[in-house]
């Protein structure tokens, strides 16, 4: 097994081009488990922890450019105001030790439907920037997940950053687990209100082969809020609106039965989380007036 | 692969490290520092918690090569001038040690918590130590130990 | 009688410390420094690493094993199969039915098939994958009731040709198991065989498979000795039982198989059976080099026995006033592929199966089955845990049926001293069942859960995962009480050995205590010191390393060590004391009445201080070694289950308070308080620590811990999906320690470790049922059960 240690982003890209089979490793919270239990023996490991570019975030073009190597711990402490949904999701990740190493880039690289960041990324309408020696491309995060634990990366590509608009409205994140820490989501839901665009962002986790937007539900909610003039009036949210939203979120999911939960439970809990998240977000929206 | 790293203040170099080894394996089997424990090797128990560049992490999730050139502090490095660190002493005195396999990881995690937050509340302690499993104590006396250490550290700071 | 509440105000510890004090444990400093040597920390120059190749199938015949490519791998020193086992090929604690390495059939997923020794664990692992095993896969037997031919709960149907029979090509095994898939059937028949009652409540219950999940992995280091023997440093619960089994497998006498207890990272029953012991010795004897073996966590799930899953049907009959008339129970325990300690677990579950209640008419049938599921054996509670879920749920159902308060119903039927157990045994010391219940009932309740709104998420179900801000949160309160036998039962020769040595070292009288009794974290080493200090009035007590150079300490299980090894240490100290006082008398040259030891001196009531112990001893050494037994127990009658089966009982009660998000089915245990009678708290802090730790394991079984097995395959062999309670899952626990002495036990003490594991889970389950308003008859309780999905 080779251990590749590029010092710069350019070197990292060159290494990946030369070793397309190399497995990138940053926080190691997925990759090392596979190595320790002999589930995987890659020809090479590509250590990204020396590439400073990846661990930086900054504002550009009105967006937050979040390096793929920024840890969940730093997300919580440094970006809680600008990316509240993602910060809430980060707080549910594993444990303090895991949050000190785990990254959004890692979540995307593994592309598990249960990855904690995904519902928040989807709700916020994030974009993923990937790069290779051939050039750079960006795509909506929803296009990045192509199958169960499969992402859109070409073999010579690495994830560079995620681009997310700072929150302009309340965001929520909710995760079901049968333990209060260090738990893989049974299912999860992310919500973001975007009052400036009058849209409602959503993200579903662990209830489909990939993380998924509840597109129809989001459109329904946005339209219903608009028709009732609620974006402007910040009036009370009709319970029927929240209920219908919840049912449409549920309809967007296609969960399975597995050892962590039944499909029926996932559908139920998704609808409960969706309803509650909308109610909480709307309550915050009303208070902000 | 050769790994050169600073561990507990000392420069350490090991050769012939297999690229798939974890930092935990290197510490335990190559550097004669078995204080960090191999309870799960999947980041789910915190028994291998060490400081990597001043940040507490699970050593089982750090690839050996990632530790090259970095600074590591393990439980063996927490003593102060050959004496138990107040966190270590508090764990013994509060009865928070039974089999003790979780203890090194908890000592490091507690050490980190008290550096950041002088007098943490119970909910803060529980959230900060939620990544450290204990199968023997039910955690109550560990909570006592953290409070005891916090009291002592704040007292000694005032002196 | 004293009471200790958790969170003492003072943390000042007496260095020294006699019986009744809470001195620091002698290994504490090493443990907090990371310098205490556990079995996986051992290292020796030139050592090799051993790994085990395990069966991927729960049931298959082995047609052939080809070790050639593995053996040819550079860095590999040995590849061994059953052909390399020089002695007995089968081992076991009760019935020797388990192959050291699989011979012609594998009977559970993970059964050891071959061993590899190499210069690096990775080399050994990859070489093991090159061993070619040709399996003919069979359909596994997975239902423990069907395996006995009892479809549809027909315990009366004792079929000699069970519906599904494990196909056995091994005549040896058929000889060992004349009853086919039945390990043991325990019967209790007491009183009227056809009792009638005003009110009858029937229930069916299931308890899933729990894992001990000790944090220290199975591990040890073996090295060859010059005399052709072998030394093994290992984490275990019973050195001598291991040694006995190893001698048979290795074909060596005990003098040549020397075991030393390495540091143990928890046990809870999971180290009672052999794991890598014989394997490491085979490799070391074969290669002539030291061999270290360490299981990682996934392998650990296959490397030790688990708690028996149980399926139970209970029928309770009572008068209209709530006085129990009869209890009938059918209990099925799935023993998995090999016998392990299933016969004793069946006995415990059966004899303790109706709970700490007085019931005149009792009918219990408890069965242990063989299946191709993972082998099950000892886990803290040992059969009593499973039945407690059933009988305590029944008591709540009965209370509801009668319109009675659940605690009131329990008190009305509570055992007391002098009551008769279902085995006919008279409870011959305190049995404070009612008092324990009233104690937990009267403890202050935790604060009400926050009303919906702006609250700290950590106080709510789901915590920072943000599932509720108080919506749909309902509180429930539940109670449970239990009892457990302490020590080995049914006539087992239960003893321990202690060697106690008194001499002067650097001017100070020093005691050395040497037992083979395994310290697994419970604090036995501290207790041994405390007893020696108390009996010999000397502060300096050294606990010698535990090994097979002294006689057996018995098993660290059945909550028995403080009783039996404590008893042995006490008795050996008393002998040493007698010798010392005899020396003192002779030195004085005249008779003094009432000589005793106090604070390093020989004193008498009449004359005060007579001499310093050090002066009496001079440069002489007093050493005594003896075996100590508790009073004998008896086997029980095979048809009626009657007999003096258990030497001691210990009682505990819990109250659980839970907040349940009933829409999502998520549970937060808000408080888990306990009252327990420990007879005499030898070390009060350690006692509280054991009770809190046991309560955590009960909570885990109630709401999150299960080894999920489908088709004989473990689906969650990992801490990712076998969930242990974290600090965020455990509630505060108030503990009331009662001390009603058992006059038959040293210092009046009662075993402590198991009862809190037994009454905690049922209390949590009861609290959830109250919050949710559903019967919830299976543990661990999952959100699906609560929400009906």
Image (cartoon, coloured by chain):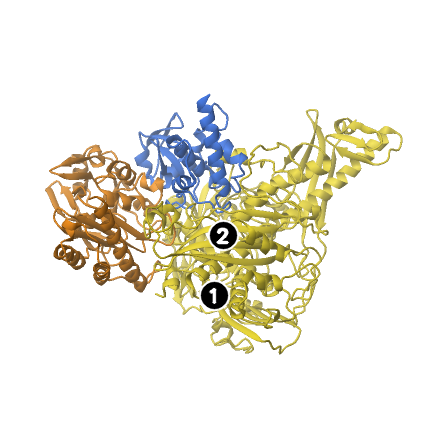
Colour of chain B in the image: blue
**Of residues C762 and A57, the one drawn nearer to the viewer in this rendering:** C762
Report whether C441 appears left or right of C731.
right
A22 to A206, vertically: above or below: above
Report whether C784 appears left or right of C428.
left
Colour of chain A in the image: orange
Q: Which residue is mark 1?
A: C206
CA distance for labels 1 and 2: 17 Å
Report whether A99 appears left or right of A216.
right
Residue C16 picture location, percent across and down: 64, 33
Binning the other alpha carbons within 10 Å of mark 2 as few (below 14), some (14 to 19) or many (20 upward) gives many
Whether residue C185 is visible, yes or no, is yes
Q: What quarter of the picture does the C terminus of chain A occupy? A: top left
Whether residue A109 is visible, yes or no, is no
Colour of chain C in the image: yellow
Kindly identify which chain the residue marked by label 1 belongs to: C
Q: What quarter of the picture does the N terminus of chain A occupy? A: top left
**Of residues B145 and C525, the one drawn nearer to the viewer in this rendering:** B145
Residue C36 picture location, percent across and down: 52, 36
Q: Mark number for residue C233?
A: none
Kindly identify which chain the residue marked by label 2 belongs to: C
Binning the other alpha carbons within 10 Å of mark 1 as few (below 14), some (14 to 19) or many (20 upward) gives many
Badges 1 and 2, same chain: yes
Residue B50 picture location, percent across and down: 39, 35
In which image quadrant can residue C528 be found?
top right
Numbered disc 1: secondary structure: strand
C785 to C455, vertically: above or below: below
Judged from this view, the residue extending furthest toward the right is C590
| First reached walking from the N terminus: tag 1 or tag 2 | 1
Q: Which residue is mark 2?
A: C697
**Of residues A205 and C237, the one drawn nearer to the viewer in this rendering:** A205
A27 to C274, vertically: above or below: above
């Amino acid at each position: 097994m080779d251990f590749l240690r590029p010092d710069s982003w350019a070197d990292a890209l060159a290494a990946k081009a030369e070793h397309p089979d190399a497995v990138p490793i940053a926080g190691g919270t997925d990759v090392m488990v596979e190595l320790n239990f002999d589930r995987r023996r890659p020809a090479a490991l590509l250590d990204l922890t020396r590439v400073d570019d990846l661990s930086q975030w900054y504002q550009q073009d009105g967006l937050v450019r979040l390096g793929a190597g920024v840890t969940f711990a730093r997300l919580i402490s440094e970006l809680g105001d600008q990316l509240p949904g993602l910060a809430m999701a980060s707080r549910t990740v594993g444990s303090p030790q895991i949050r000190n190493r785990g990254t959004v880039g890692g979540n995307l690289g593994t592309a598990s439907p249960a990855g904690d960041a995904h519902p928040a990324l989807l709700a916020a309408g994030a974009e993923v920037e990937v790069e290779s020696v051939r050039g750079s491309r960006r795509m909506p995060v929803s296009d990045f997940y192509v199958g169960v634990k499969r992402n859109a990366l070409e073999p010579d590509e690495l994830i560079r950053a995620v681009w997310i608009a700072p929150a302009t409205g309340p965001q929520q994140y909710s995760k079901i687990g049968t333990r209060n820490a260090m738990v893989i989501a049974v299912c999860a839901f992310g919500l973001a209100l975007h009052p400036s665009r009058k849209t409602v962002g959503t993200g579903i986790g662990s209830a489909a082969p990939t993380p998924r937007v509840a597109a129809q539900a989001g459109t329904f909610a946005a339209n219903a809020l608009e028709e009732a003039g609620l974006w402007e009036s910040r009036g009370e949210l009709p319970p029927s609106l929240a209920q219908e939203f919840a049912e449409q979120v549920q309809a967007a999911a296609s969960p399975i039965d597995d050892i962590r939960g039944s499909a029926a439970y996932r559908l139920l809990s998704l609808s409960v989380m969706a309803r509650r998240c909308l109610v909480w977000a709307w309550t915050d929206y009303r208070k902000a007036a | 692969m050769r790994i050169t790293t600073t561990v507990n203040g000392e420069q350490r170099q090991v050769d012939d490290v297999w690229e798939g080894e974890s930092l935990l394996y290197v510490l335990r089997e190559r550097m004669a520092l078995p204080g960090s424990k191999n309870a799960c090797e999947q980041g789910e128990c915190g028994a291998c918690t060490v400081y990597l560049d001043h940040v507490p992490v699970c050593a089982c999730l750090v690839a050996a090569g990632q530790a090259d050139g970095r600074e590591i502090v393990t439980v063996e490095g927490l003593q102060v001038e050959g004496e138990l660190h107040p966190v270590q002493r508090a764990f013994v005195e509060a009865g928070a040690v039974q089999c003790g396999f979780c203890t090194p990881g908890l000592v490091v995690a507690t050490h980190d918590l008290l550096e950041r937050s002088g007098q943490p509340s119970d909910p803060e302690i529980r959230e900060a130590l939620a990544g450290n499993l204990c199968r023997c104590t039910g955690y109550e006396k560990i909570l006592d130990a953290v409070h005891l250490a916090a009291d002592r550290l704040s007292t000694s700071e005032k002196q | 009688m004293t009471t200790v509440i958790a969170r003492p105000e003072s943390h000042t510890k007496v260095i020294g410390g006699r019986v009744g004090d809470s001195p620091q444990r002698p290994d504490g400093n090493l443990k907090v420094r990371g310098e205490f040597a556990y079995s996986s920390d051992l290292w020796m120059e030139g050592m090799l690493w051993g790994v085990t190749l395990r069966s991927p199938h729960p049931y298959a015949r082995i047609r052939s094993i080809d070790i050639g490519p593995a053996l040819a791998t550079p860095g590999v020193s040995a590849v061994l199969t059953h052909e390399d086992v020089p002695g007995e090929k089968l081992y076991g604690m009760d019935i020797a039915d388990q192959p050291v390495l699989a011979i012609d059939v594998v009977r559970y997923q993970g059964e050891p098939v071959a061993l590899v020794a190499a210069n690096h664990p990775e080399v050994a692992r990859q070489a093991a994958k090159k061993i070619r095993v040709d399996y003919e896969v069979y359909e596994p037997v997975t239902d423990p009731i069907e395996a006995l031919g009892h479809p549809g709960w027909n315990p009366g149907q004792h079929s000699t040709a069970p519906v599904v029979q494990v196909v056995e090509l091994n005549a040896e095994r058929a000889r060992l198991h004349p009853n086919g898939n039945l390990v043991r059937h325990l019967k209790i028949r007491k009183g009227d065989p056809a009792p009638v009652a005003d009110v009858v409540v029937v229930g069916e219950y299931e308890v899933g498979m729990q894992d001990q999940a000790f944090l220290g992995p199975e591990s040890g280091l073996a090295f060859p000795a010059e005399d052709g023997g072998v030394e093994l440093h290992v984490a275990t619960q019973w050195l001598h039982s291991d040694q006995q089994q190893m001698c048979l497998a290795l074909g060596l006498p005990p003098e040549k198989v020397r075991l030393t207890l390495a540091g143990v990272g928890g046990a809870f029953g999971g180290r009672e059976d052999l794991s890598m012991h014989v394997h490491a010795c085979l490799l070391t004897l074969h290669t002539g080099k030291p061999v270290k073996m360490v299981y990682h966590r996934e392998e650990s799930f296959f490397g030790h026995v688990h708690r028996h899953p149980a399926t139970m049907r209970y029928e309770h009959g009572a008068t209209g006033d709530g006085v129990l008339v009869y209890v009938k129970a059918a209990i099925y325990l799935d023993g998995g592929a090999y016998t392990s300690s299933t016969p004793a677990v069946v006995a415990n579950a059966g004899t303790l199966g109706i709970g700490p209640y007085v019931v005149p008419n009792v009918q219990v049938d408890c069965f242990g089955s063989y299946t191709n599921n993972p082998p099950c054996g000892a886990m803290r509670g040992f059969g009593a845990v499973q039945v407690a879920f059933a009988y305590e749920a029944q008591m709540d159902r009965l209370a509801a049926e009668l319109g009675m308060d659940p605690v009131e119903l329990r008190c009305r039927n509570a055992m007391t001293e002098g009551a008769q157990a279902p085995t006919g045994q008279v409870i011959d010391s305190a049995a404070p069942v009612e008092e324990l219940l009233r104690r937990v009932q009267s403890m202050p309740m935790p604060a009400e859960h926050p009303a919906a709104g702006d609250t700290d998420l950590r106080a709510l179900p789901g915590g920072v995962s943000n599932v509720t801000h108080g919506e749909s949160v309902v509180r429930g309160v539940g109670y449970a009480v239990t009892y457990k036998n302490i020590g080995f039962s049914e006539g087992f020769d239960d003893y321990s050995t202690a060697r106690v040595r008194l001499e002067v070292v650097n001017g100070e009288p020093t005691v050395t205590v040497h037992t083979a009794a395994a310290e697994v974290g419970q604090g036995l080493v501290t207790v041994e010191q405390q007893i020696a200090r108390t009996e010999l009035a000397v502060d300096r007590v050294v606990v010698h390393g535990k090994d097979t150079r002294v006689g057996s300490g018995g098993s660290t299980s059945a909550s028995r060590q403080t009783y039996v090894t404590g008893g042995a240490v006490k008795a050996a100290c008393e002998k040493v004391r007698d010798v010392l006082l005899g020396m003192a008398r002779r030195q004085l040259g005249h008779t003094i009445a009432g000589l005793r030891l106090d604070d390093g001196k020989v004193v008498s009531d009449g004359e005060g201080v007579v001499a310093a112990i050090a002066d009496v001893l001079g440069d002489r050494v007093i050493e005594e070694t003896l075996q100590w037994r508790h009073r004998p127990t008896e086997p029980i009658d095979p048809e009626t289950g009657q007999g003096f089966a258990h030497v001691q009982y210990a009682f505990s009660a819990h109250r659980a308070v839970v907040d349940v998000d009933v829409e999502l089915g998520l549970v937060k245990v808000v408080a888990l308080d306990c009252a327990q009678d420990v007879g005499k708290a030898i070390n009060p802090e350690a006692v509280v620590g054991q009770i809190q730790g046991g309560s955590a394991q009960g909570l885990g079984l109630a709401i999150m811990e299960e080894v999920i097995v489908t088709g004989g395959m473990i689906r969650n062999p990992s801490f990712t999906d076998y969930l242990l309670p974290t600090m965020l899952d455990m509630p505060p626990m108030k503990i009331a320690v009662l001390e009603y002495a058992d006059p038959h036990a040293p210092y009046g003490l009662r075993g402590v470790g198991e009862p809190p594991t037994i009454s905690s889970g049922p209390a949590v389950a009861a609290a959830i049922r109250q919050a949710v308003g559903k019967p919830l008859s299976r543990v661990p309780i999952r959100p699906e059960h609560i929400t009906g999905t």
